[in-house]
Amino acid sequence: MSSQVTQSKVKAFAVNNTMLFFAVILFAACMIGVPRFATGGNLMNILIQVSINALIACGMTFVILSDGIDLSVGSVAAIAGVAGASLIKQMPDAGIAACIAVILVTAVVVGTICGSINGFCIAKLNVPPFIATLAMMNAARGLAYVFTDAKPVFGLPDSFGWVGLRSIGVIPVSIVLMVIVIGLSYLVLSKTCFGRYIYAVGSNKEVAKLTGINVTMTRFSVYVISGILAALAGLVLASKLQNGQATAATGYELNAIAAVAMGGTSMSGGRGGIPQTVVGLFVIGIINNALSLLGVSSYWQTVAMGAIILVAVIIDQFRK
């Protein structure tokens, strides 16, 4: 009897951690078969490359767990980057502390505005998440073009690049920020009542409502969180590029959705979490990095991203 229980636990663990095993095998294969992959500098590059997508993917995890979707995150990142760059351009003598303050305040303000509009339309007006966030995706991107007249915002002080380009010791600031956001997101989803509410709403809205959960506020809140983290990612990207561009972060919403789905978070909500998203992030990061080292065209990397999303959804259906 005990052996059957053990076998059942092992099988359940294997099913729930399929992507983790795949990530380990993929990493080992790349270390053996891809030139220069296993160097310290390249492994650090992978972390830097996934750091911005990680911020957006954490917010996307909140949304997808609640049985939603947010297609606007790339455009929100772009308009936040443009707004932050334009503001800091008026402060040519700004120090690092002032630039960090501008980045944080702009992320909260822009992200809250965009996320609140999404959340209100979805949670209060019952607009389908796909339609509401698609509208925001176009509106935010269009406003970014109007605001900049389709020209980059450049001529920024060097201190603005501290978040995107500098390091604390040997660790880039963007990686430190990624770790902080991942840690906080994990604590919120796994250790708070609000996190439990998100899982409950994603599993079954009607049952969640009957148990006393404020479904409307919970659904509204996840889009605000997604908006703030997307805006923060856009400002980190602007800091890295040392300019704000209306074209920035194009397609980042697909990268975030792919990371969440690839990790094993259910696209229909209620199952998954930040650890799964982290696994998905690094699977995608490793694949993209390996393809680049092998000289594969960026166009084929886009094809690979589409295939990753499809495979992730198919695996999710089989897991169900």
Image (cartoon, grey):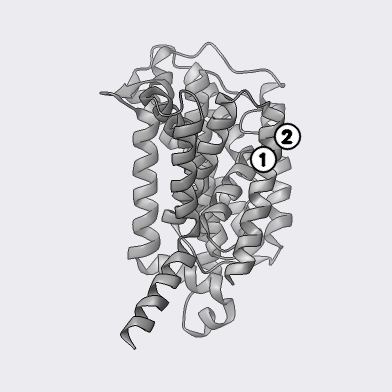
Question: In the figure, is residue 283 to the left or right of 167?
Answer: right
Point out the residue furthest to the left here.
169
Name the residue at 71% across, 56% down: 130
- Name the kind of residue labelled 1 in the image: Ala
Give 310 or 119, whichever is nearer the viewer.
310
Residue 142: which disc? Answer: 2
Callout 2, which amino acid? Answer: Gly
At x 41% / y 66%, what residue is drawn?
194
Mark 2 or 1, nearer chain start: 2
Q: Which residue is disc 1 drawn over?
A: 304
Q: Residues within 10 Å of mark 2 (few under 14, many from 20)?
A: some
Could you tell me residue 273's position as x and y percent?
45, 59
The image shows residue 296 at horizontal and vertical percentages of 65, 27
If the image is split into quadrants, where does the C terminus sit? bottom right
Query: Vertically, is 42 above or below 259?
Result: above
SS for dot 2: helix
Confirm whether residue 228 shows in the render.
no
The kind of secondary structure element at disc 1 is helix
Q: Nearer the viewer, residue 310 or 132?
A: 310
Q: Residue furthest bottom?
A: 1
Q: Distance between the residues labelled 2 and 1?
A: 28 Å
Name the residue nearer the viewer: 235 or 241: 241
Answer with the quarter of the image where residue 77 lies.
top right
